[in-house]
Image (cartoon, rainbow, N blue to C red):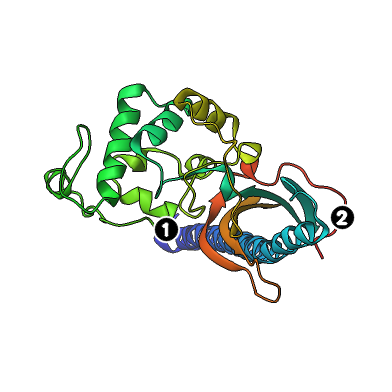
Amino acid sequence: MNQSDRSPGRHGGFALVFVLWILMLAGFLAATNAQSSRSNALTTLGYSNHAALRWSAKAGLSVAINEIAGAKTRGEAVPLSFGCRFGEVDLLVELQDEQGKIDLNVAGPASVGAVLVELGVDDKSAAGLADKLADYVDTDELQRPQGAEAIQYTQTKSLDEPRNGSLNSLLELARVLDWDSLPIDEVSRHFTVHSGSSRVDRSLASTELLRAIDVLGKPGSAFKPSSKRTYTVRLSAKRDNDAYQQTNVVDMPHIAGQSARVLETAFGFIPPAEGAKSIDARSCV
């Protein structure tokens, strides 16, 4: 067989390989495009869920404020928690009166340390945290035994330094040396900066706080309720596999016609297991 006899078969083989390569490339591009479309659809769904959760929590805060105001008007106790639904979003609302907490702007190191011990902090660390907080808010430069003044913040290369004044928010605790090791959500269940009282209403206090009060020998029977009522409002929202939590501190008006004021806000997306755990059948609206 001469050279011209072999050429058609060889060229046909090359053409077949080329066609197969084109088909494989087209299949790959189609699969990539399909995967991209699915990813875009999931991303869009995720954004939609996140927006729904955030707006539901925002609306839930208004529902919570109305619940508090309604209970006060009727002379009833403010509910500790309730659940409801915004469309496909399940919302769990928890309410806590700040007068059932230790005010960090008023309490001394002994009280703060005693509560931290009840929360599981060891005695030495609790005393250190209490001293560091006291040094952070006081106006002098005298360091307590386990405290920290400006020089200690410099030595640890901290970007913060003592405030030398009252805390305006519990979120400021992250700036106090070593306090960032404590989960703020747990801290906020026992401490406040808004009650303005050196006493705690035992009927509103947590079990851990009551134990600390008993250890210190400071009964709450002499507590005098203030006309100023401030509440922590925790909102946990869940939809599909997404969950969102928002915590607000709300100052309720004690004069008719005034509006509630939001003093603090913290929020973030959380693992779904930590989202709304239970709801009732009613709608939030």
User: In the rendered image, is residue 240 in sight?
Assistant: no
Badge nearest the viewer, 2 or 1: 2
Circle 2 packing at 10 Å, graded few (<14), some (14-19), many (20+), is few
Q: Say whether residue 58 is left or right of residue 78.
A: left
Q: Say whether residue 134 is left or right of residue 41.
A: left
- The residue most toward the front is 222
* Relative vertical location of residue 93 with respect to residue 110 in this rendering, above or below: below
Label ID, residue 282: 2
Q: Nearer the viewer, residue 94 or 257?
A: 257
Circle 1 packing at 10 Å, graded few (<14), some (14-19), many (20+), is few
* Residue at horizontal 32 percent and vertical 36 percent from the top: 129
Residue 36 in percent (x, y) is at 57, 62
Residue 256 in percent (x, y) is at 71, 73
Distance, label 2 to label 1, CA atoms, is 90 Å
Q: Nearer the viewer, residue 143 or 278?
A: 143
User: In the rendered image, is residue 246 in sight?
Assistant: yes
Under mark 2, the amino acid is Arg
Residue 74 location, quadrant: bottom right
Label ID, residue 2: 1
Q: Say whether residue 99 is left or right of residue 121.
A: right
- The residue most toward the right is 281
